[in-house]
Amino acid sequence: MSVQEEVLEEVLTETKEKKQNEIVVFNDDVNTFDHVIEMLMDACEHDMLQAEQCTLLIHYKGKCAVKTGDFEDLQPRCTKLLEAGISAEIQ
């Protein structure tokens, strides 16, 4: 086994062991596309295209995981979305 393979194996093992949380945003009949896009760009640091794509998924699928990461990073982001009137939760 090469050094590169060993390092890759260690990284994959560490990734599996660390539980990642997600912010899931749910569709509603209140918020506009523009508002949701703007808030995803602000709270989740999405670029315009990513925010638009997530907003379309939220609209057509009913929900979308918009950000993945550690709970400590996601909590203030989710709070910002909730304060903006967007239905979101960390799963």
Image (spheres, rainbow, N blue to C red):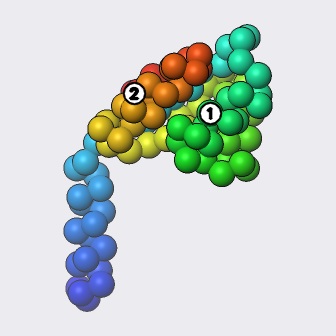
Count of numbered labels shown in the rendering: 2
Question: Could you tell whether 79 is left or right of 38 in the image?
Answer: left
Q: Decide: few, some or many residues near mark 2? Use Cα within 10 Å; few <14, some 14-19, many ≥20.
A: few
Looking at the rendered structure, the secondary structure element under dot 1 is: helix
What residue does disc 1 label?
Answer: 39
Residue 57 position in % (x across, y down): 69, 33
Residue 41 position in % (x across, y down): 62, 42
Q: Is residue 75 visible?
A: yes
Looking at the rendered structure, the secondary structure element under dot 2 is: loop
Residue 84 position in % (x across, y down): 58, 21
Question: Could you tell whether 45 is left or right of 55 in the image?
Answer: left
Q: Is residue 2 above or below residue 49?
A: below
Tell me the quadrant of the picture where the N terminus can be found.
bottom left
Residue 71: name its quadrant: top left
Question: Could you tell whether 56 is left or right of 27 in the image?
Answer: right
What residue does disc 2 label?
Answer: 91
